[in-house]
Image (cartoon, rainbow, N blue to C red):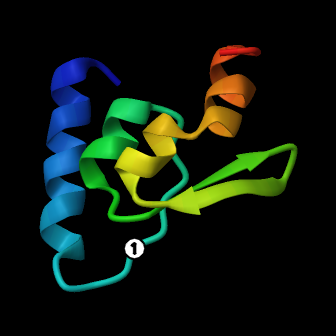
């Protein structure tokens, strides 16, 4: 999807999920961080971390697994 289509989909998801629990699988991190109240990060099918977006963003294990930032 292009950026406009993604923004439209995010707004649609936000509207239909208000007051409900919704589980999505997404790799576009801007989408994940704009929608999620809680995020679970999986690596090779195992949960690496589950927390609020700000904590996930700062989690060293997540950074190493997804950004290759070893030894920060």
Identify the residue under disc 1: 22
Left or right of 62 on screen, residue 29: left
Left or right of 8 on screen, residue 70: right
Residue pictured at 74% horizontal, 29% vertical: 65
Left or right of 11 on screen, residue 66: right
Across and down, in percent, residue 51 comes to: 50, 61
Residue pictured at 40% horizontal, 59% vertical: 52
- Residue 40 placement: quadrant: bottom right
Across and down, in percent, residue 18 comes to: 16, 76
Along the line of sight, the residue nearer the viewer: 15 or 54? 54
Across and down, in percent, residue 7 comes to: 17, 35
Q: Quadrant of the C terminus?
A: top right
Along the line of sight, the residue nearer the viewer: 53 or 5? 53
Q: Quadrant of the N terminus?
A: top left
Q: Is residue 53 above or below residue 28?
A: below
- Residue 28 placement: quadrant: top left
Q: Is residue 23 above or below residue 57?
A: below
Q: Is residue 9 above or below residue 17?
A: above
Residue pictured at 62% horizontal, 27% vertical: 63
Looking at the rendered structure, the number of numbered marks drawn on it comes to: 1
**How many residues crowd around disc 1 within 10 Å: few (fewer than 14), some, or many (20 or more)?**
few
Residue pictured at 84% horizontal, 53% vertical: 45
Along the line of sight, the residue nearer the viewer: 64 or 38? 64
Outermost residue, bottom side: 19
Across and down, in percent, residue 58 comes to: 48, 37
> Circle 1 — which element?
loop
Along the line of sight, the residue nearer the viewer: 32 or 11? 32
């Amino acid at each position: 999807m292009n950026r406009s289509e993604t923004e439209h989909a995010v707004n649609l998801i936000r509207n239909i999920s208000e007051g409900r629990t919704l589980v999505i699988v997404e790799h576009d991190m801007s989408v994940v961080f704009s929608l999620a109240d809680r995020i679970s990060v999986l690596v090779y099918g195992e949960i690496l971390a589950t927390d609020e977006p700000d904590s996930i963003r700062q989690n060293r294990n997540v950074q190493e697994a997804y950004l290759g930032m070893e030894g920060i």
